[in-house]
Amino acid sequence: MRVKTAGFTNPDKGLITAPQGVWPILMKMPWGLNVKHLYLAFFSVISIALCAFSLVIYDQYQKSQNLNDYMRYEYENIRRTKNILMDIVDMETGVRGYVLTGDKTYLKPYEIASDRLPGEIMALRQATYYESNAFAETNSLLDRVDSLQKLLESQMNYMHAHGRGQVSQNALSIQRAQMDEVETIIEASIAHRLASVKTRRDLVEPRKTNFFYILVIGTILGVGIVLCGTILIIRLESENEDIRALNEGAEARFRSVMNGTNDGVFELNFINETIYMSKEFKAMLGYGEDELDTDMHTFSALVHPDDFDAYMQVRHDYIIKQTPTYNNIFRLKHKDGTWRWMMARGVGAWDKFGQIRTMIGTHTDITEQKNREEELRQLNNDMEAFTYITSHDMRSPLVNLKGFSHELALAVQEVDDLLEPQQKKLGAEAWARLEHILRKDIPEALGFIGNAVDRMDTLTTAILDLSRIGKFVYRDELVDAQAVFDKCLGAQSYEISSKAVEVNVKPLPKLITDPIALEQVFSNLLDNAVKYLKPGEPGRIEMSCQETSRDYIFTLRDNGRGIDAEDSDRVFNIFRRARNTGDVRGLGLGMAFVKATLRKMNGAIWFDSQLGVGTAFHVSLPKRMPVTASNDQTIKGEDAA
Amino acid sequence: MISTFTQPFSVVLIEDDEGHANLINRNLQRAGVLNPITRLRDGHEALTYFFGSDAHTQPLDRTVVVLDLNLPDVDGFEILGRLKTDETTRRIPVIVLTTTDNPRDIDRCYALGCNAFMTKPVGYNDFSEAIQKLGLMLTIVRVPHTRP
C-alpha cells in the first residue's frame, strides 16, 4: 500500500514535513486527493454496504413474519371453521339423541353449541370480511347453519308436541343433506385455505435459500472487512510507531543540538500574545526555569530601549512577509543588569488570511562576537585614520626636504657664481677642492636626498591609495567585461606594441560589479603581465573567462618569467615583490591593491605559475542579480504596505 | 620676469610648519608678491588675529588669507568656517594651501566657502610653480573692501 522511505530525514524540509514523507505514492494523487479522502470513500462504501445488508435482512425478516402472520391467520380461520363444524355436529348429535331417547339431558350440548355458534361465525366473518369469497362463504355458512338450526328446532318442537321417535324419514334426510352441505362448505373452505397457505409458503420457500446465501455472503464480507480494517489498523499503528520512533530520534537529536549550542528556543504566540521561552533561553539571561512569565510584554520589556524600534520593525517586516527570513539582532537585559547581544532567527506560521499566528525560533548570544566586531571596527578605524594621517603628515616634512634641498642647490649655485671670479686668488689646489665640493659632492648629496624623497612620496601616496580602498563606495552596475578589458589594453597599447606582445582576448561576459574597480583589477593584472614578460622572447597574453554556477572566473595567462613557488606568498603582500623582478621598476603595490579591491568586491584572486614558462592569474567575481530588480521589489513592497 | 606687484593689500599666512612658511615666503617673493606677509603659527593665533579683542585694530580689509588645513590645535576647517560665517570676515578671500589632495577634504573646503584650493606638491619645481601661480593670482585678484 505504501512504501516507507527515507524521506523523513529529508534535510530540505526538516522535521515538520516528516509524516508526509511516509506517503510518497499517495502524495502524487491527482485532484488534490490524499489518503484521508481514500479512507473516507472506503469506509462510506462499507457503511452503505452494511446498511443495504441490514435492509435485505430486515426485508427477509419482514417477509417471513408476514408469512407467519398469514399462516397463523389461516390456521386460526381453519380452527374457527372446524369449531363451527364441531358445534354443528354437537348440535345435530344432541338433537338426534333427544329425538331418539326423549331424554332432555341430550339437549345440553345442543344448547351450548347453539349459543356459541352465532358468535363464532360472526368472529370468523369479522376476521375474513375483506376476503370477498370468504365473506360469501361465511354468509352461506350462516344461512346453512340458520336453516339447520331451524330444522333442528322444528324437530325439537315436534318432539315436544308428539313425543319420542316421531321424526319422519323425510325430515331426517333433509337434515342429512343439510349437514352434508355444511360439511362440504367447511371442508372446501379449509381445503382452500390450506392450498392458499401452501402457495404462500411455496412462494417464500426459495427466498429462504436466497436469504441463507445472502447471510453467508454478508458474513464473509463482514469478516473480510473487519479483517482488512484490523490489518490496516495494525499497519498504521506500526507505521505510527515507526514515525514516532523517528520523531523521538529527531527530537532527541534536536534537543542535544540545542543543548550543545546553548541556543535558547522561543515561540511567540500572536493570538494570545504569549511567549514560550526554553530553559536555555532564560538561562542565557540569567533567569531560572520558573522565572519570567509567558506574557509577550515581559519579554519586550527586556529589549534595549535603543534597539526596541529596530527590533519591532524587523519583526513587523517579517510578519507582513516583507522580508523572507527573520534575522534580528538586538540587546536584551540580563538579570545582572548588563546587556547581551542576541541574534534571533525564526520561522512564522500564518493562517489562511495571511495573519501571523506563531513564530518559533532561536536566540543566540552573540555578545562576544559583537564585542570583537566592535573592537575590530575600532581597530580598523584607527588603522585607517593612522594611514590617512601618517601619509599626510609624512608629506609635510617631504615638502621641506625637497624645498630646502633645492634652496640649497640654488645657494650653492650662487656661491659657485660668486667664487668663480675669485679662483685665481684661492689658488689652484683650493679651487679644485672647492669645485669638487660645489659641483660634485653637494649636487650628488642633494640628488640622493631628492631621490629618497621621491621614493618616500610614492610610498606615502601608495599607502594613501590602499587606505582609500576601504572608503571607496562601490556601485554595482551591469558592466561589459570585454569593454573594460579593451579599455585597459588601450591604456597600455604603447607598451604592448613596442614589445610586440600578442594579445588574445576570448569572449568576456557582462556582469554586475563596480566598473572602476574592475578596470583597476584588469589594468594591474595586464600591466604585470606585460611588465614581467621574458626579455628577448615574443610575449603572448591570453584573457579568457569561465562561468561556474556561482562565479565568473577570469583568467589572464602569459608566457612570462613565471613566479617561483618560494615567492608565492609574497606576491600579494604590500611592498613585496618576487625575486626575479629586480630589473623592472615597481613598489610591490599592484597585487596588494588588486587583492584588497577584490576582497571588497566579494571576489578572489589566485594564480598558478611555472618558473620560466608563464603565469595564469585567476580572478573570480560572484554572479549577482541586477541591483535594480531588488529596488523594484522594495518599491513594490512599499506600495503594498 | 614678473613685474613687482605693489597693490596695497596684505597676505595673512596661517601655517604651522616653519619650513613651509619659509618656502612659501621665498617663492611668493620670487613671483613678485612684495606685499606684507603676516605669518600666524597656529589656529589659536589665527582666531585671535581675526576675532580677538583687538581684532578691529588689525587692517582686516584688503587682506588675502592663505590657510593650511593641518594645524596642531584648531584645524583649518574650523578657521575657514569661522571666517566665512562671520560678517566682518566673510568677504576676505581664503586660499587653502595644504598637503591634502583628498577629494572629500576639497569638497568640504568648498562647502565651507573657500575661494580656492591648492595642493602643496612634494616636488620642489611643482611646489614653487604652484606658489608662483598663487602669486600671479594674487596680483590680479581684486580684493573687496571688507569694511565700508
Image: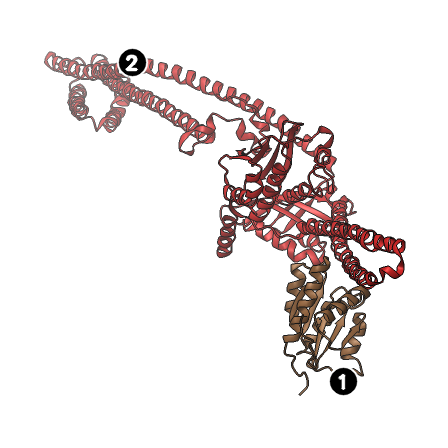
Q: How is the image coloured?
A: by chain
Q: Residue at image x 77%, y 44%? A: A283
Asked if residue A174 lies left or right of residue A8, the reply is left
Q: Where's residue A168, x and y in %?
A: 12, 13
Q: Where's residue A141, x and y in %?
A: 18, 22
Q: Element under label 1? A: helix
> Which amino acid type is shown beneath numbered disc 1?
His
Chain rendered red: A
Asked if residue B83 lies left or right of residue A474, the reply is right
Residue A288, placed above or below residue A226: below
Residue A111, placed above or below residue A557: above
- The one nearer the camera, A12 or A89, is A12
Q: Residue at image x 45%, y 31%? A: A34
The residue carrying pointer 1 sits among few (fewer than 14), some (14 to 19) or many (20 or more) residues within 10 Å by Cα, namely few
Does residue A233 appear in this view?
A: yes
> Which amino acid type is shown beneath numbered disc 2?
Pro
Q: Colour of chain B?
A: brown
Residue bearing the label numbered 1: B56
Which mark's residue is nearer the viewer, 1 or 2?
1
Q: Chain ID for label 2?
A: A
Residue bearing the label numbered 2: A206
